[in-house]
Image (cartoon, rainbow, N blue to C red):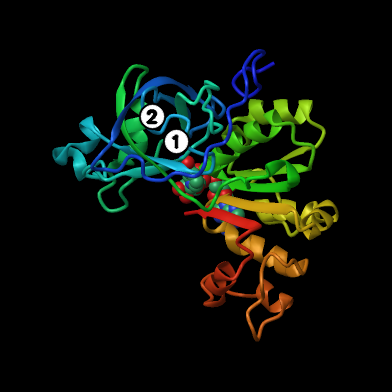
């Protein structure tokens, strides 16, 4: 039993609230307290990915946010110091949005916490060779239990679970920290007793980067309707000898996924890097899925040959079936 993802005895599941947005804004923030933080990828990974739990007891957001929404964080302290901003890509109080990674009732089951998942952004300035830190991500990853953090939100109305989640099958596709909302969604679905099929296809560079792996392996062990597949781009090869990406897993598993996606009750979610969209649209075109429409003058074969920056991609994106193909990509 893992009491963070599986309802402890005696706890009743809280109802999923109506969708509320912008309860807190940059002009009206809430001071959340850091309850805990833990690394969620392998300790030997060169990436630092953290799960951070905030206490929101007494906040108007308590019990009012939904999984699939995001909260904003306003960096402070040294990451918002104008003297350091040149180095630290200063945000000057600008809000950075992070997807909520806990179920709508929080990791505490009572709605009094909200959790996010954050990867430290670090790179070198190509001109000066100086180390460059992402201001918000390093601010959050440096925070200690007890610290106050200004938050805003919730925001987002389009990347939610449907109101009747148990009547749907789900195919969740993530790259990198785009995994965040699926953790909360899976916790909600499994604790509500979902019997339909659930797929989680998760792409990361190295096997040490698979976030929340223990949680997903636990669900895999305890729920035979859950399929969890990782695409480790820099360690595995696809059938053509290239990097194995999430869209390659869709191809590998299409004998199961095509009939699943033909059901009008199946939802497909994409979260993470914008770049993965084209590959997924190409696969959907190839299998003749009604989740997308092929622009006039093209056919499924021509979609496979579209350049990465082709003008047709935004058309495919705009005309997708927005009821069943949901995306949160950057
Ligand atoms: P990452 O660790 O670099 O992993 C991304 C994976 O996707 C890598 O395996 C990468 O492979 C692969 N990839 C690259 N191009 C691809 C393509 N065209 N098709 C399919 N896969 C591709 O990712 P990250 O740095 O965490 O970035 C995740 C993104 O999610 C960010 O843009 C972030 O803003 C966004 N996001 C974050 C949150 C959050 O709450 N933190 C929520 C939603 C979305 P290679 O690098 O080996 O090519």
The disc label shown at residue 206, or none: none
Instruction: Specify the farthest residue to the left.
Output: 83
Q: Judge from the rendering whether residue 141 lies leftward or rightward of residue 161; answer left or right.
A: left
| Residue 224 location (% of width, % of height) | 82, 33
Foreground of the two, 90 or 291 = 291
Q: Judge from the rendering whether residue 174 lies leftward or rightward of residue 224; answer left or right.
A: left
Task: Answer few, some or many: residues within 10 Å of disc 1's Cα (few below 14, many 20 plus, some between 14 and 19).
Answer: many
Q: With respect to residue 105, does 93 lie above or below?
A: below
Name the residue located 58 percent from the left edge and 27 percent from the top edge: 14
| SS for dot 2 | helix
Label pair 1/2, CB-CB below 8 angstroms: yes
| SS for dot 1 | strand
Residue bearing mark 2: 141
Foreground of the two, 133 or 173 = 173
| Residue 210 location (% of width, % of height) | 60, 35
The disc label shown at residue 118, or none: 1
């Amino acid at each position: 039993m893992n009491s963070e993802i599986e309802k402890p005895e005696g706890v009743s599941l809280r109802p999923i609230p109506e969708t509320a947005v912008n309860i807190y804004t940059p002009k009206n923030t809430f001071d959340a307290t850091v309850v805990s933080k833990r690394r969620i990828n392998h300790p030997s990974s060169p990436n630092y990915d953290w799960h951070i739990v905030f206490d929101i007891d007494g906040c108007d957001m308590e019990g009012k946010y939904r999984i699939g929404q995001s909260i904003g964080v306003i960096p402070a302290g040294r990451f918002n110091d104008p003297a350091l901003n040149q180095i630290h890509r200063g945000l000057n109080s600008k809000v950075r949005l992070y997807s909520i990674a806990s179920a709508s009732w929080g990791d505490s089951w009572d709605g009094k916490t909200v959790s996010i998942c954050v990867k430290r952004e670090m790179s070198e300035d190509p001109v000066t060779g100086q180390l460059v830190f992402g201001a918000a991500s390093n601010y959050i990853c440096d925070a200690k239990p007890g610290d106050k953090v200004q938050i805003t939100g919730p925001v987002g109305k389009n990347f939610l679970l449907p109101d009747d989640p148990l009547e749907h099958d789900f195919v969740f596709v993530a790259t990198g920290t785009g995994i965040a909302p699926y953790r909360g969604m899976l916790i909600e679905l499994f604790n509500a007793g979902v019997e339909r099929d659930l797929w989680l296809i998760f792409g990361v560079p190295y096997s040490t980067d698979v976030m929340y792996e223990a949680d997903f392996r636990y669900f895999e062990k305890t729920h035979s309707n859950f399929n969890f597949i990782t695409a480790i781009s820099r360690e595995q090869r696809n059938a053509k000898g290239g990097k194995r990406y999430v869209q390659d897993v869709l191809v590998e598993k299409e004998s199961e996924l095509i009939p699943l996606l033909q059901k009008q009750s199946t939802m497909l979610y994409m979260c993470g890097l914008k770049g993965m969209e084209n590959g997924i649209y190409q696969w959907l075109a190839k299998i003749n899925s009604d989740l997308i429409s092929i622009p006039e003058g093209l056919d499924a074969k021509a979609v496979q040959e579209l350049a990465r920056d082709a003008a047709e991609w935004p058309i495919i994106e705009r005309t997708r079936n927005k009821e069943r193909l949901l995306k949160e990509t950057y």
